[in-house]
Image (cartoon, grey):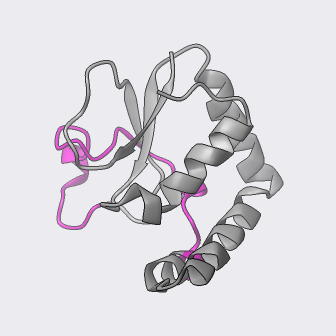
Amino acid sequence: MAIRIVRLGSPRLDGEGTRIGTVRRPPRGVPKSDFATRDWYDVWFPNLAPSAETVRLGQEAQTPAQWQAFVRMYRAEMATPDNSHALQLLATLSQYTDFSVGCYCEDEARCHRSVLRELLAGKGAKLA
């Protein structure tokens, strides 16, 4: 049992389980009824997505210092009680079932899902 961190829209892996989209917006031009069959996500959970302002900061980051500013801002957002509880819930569920969380970004190293991976690990999640 574990959480996989994935790129939404990529082909699903065997045993991946339910795919959770931690993104601010649904995929453009895709009918809602096709989200799961086209490997986007089964469940949309924007609570763990960065705010619009934070997303913009991450997308515009050109230097390591700018990227670290994004990371600090996203971590602060995830430290709120509601988001912290959501992270703990996912970490606990990872002990009992397989599922995945993801975002659209091509490069995980420059995506909030790299930080999300660390936050989940910090809550005791089993990661694939």
Asked whether residue 35 is drawn in magenta, I would say yes
Q: Please state if 117 lies on the left or on the right of 100 as rendered.
A: right
Q: Which residue is drawn at 46% across and 27% down?
A: 128
Which one is nearer the viewer's eye here, 57 or 29?
57
**x then y, percent, for residue 107:** 35, 60
The quadrant in which residue 59 appears is bottom left
Q: Which residue is drawn at 48% across and 52% down?
A: 22
| Residue depicted at x 37% and y 43% | 6
Question: In this picture, is 117 found above or below 106?
Answer: above
Q: Is the magenta stretch mostly helix, strand or loop?
A: loop
Query: Residue drawn at (66%, 37%), measured in percent from left and top?
Result: 121
Query: Residue 19 location in percent, x, y?
Result: 38, 36
How far from the left and from the top, in percent, is residue 33? 22, 45
The number of numbered badges drawn on the structure is 0
Query: Residues in magenta?
Result: 27-54
| Residue 21 image position (x, y, % from top left) | 42, 48
Above or below for 58 versus 76: below
- Above or below residue 51? Residue 127 is above
Compared to residue 118, the image places residue 97 above or below, namely above
Which image quadrant is residue 87 in? top right
> Residue 110 sits in which quadrant?
bottom left
Taking the view exactly as shown, the residue that stands out farthest to the front is 64
| Drawn side of residue 37 relative to residue 70, left or right | left
Magenta stretch encompasses residue 79: no
Q: Going by the picture, which residue comes out furthest to the right?
A: 81
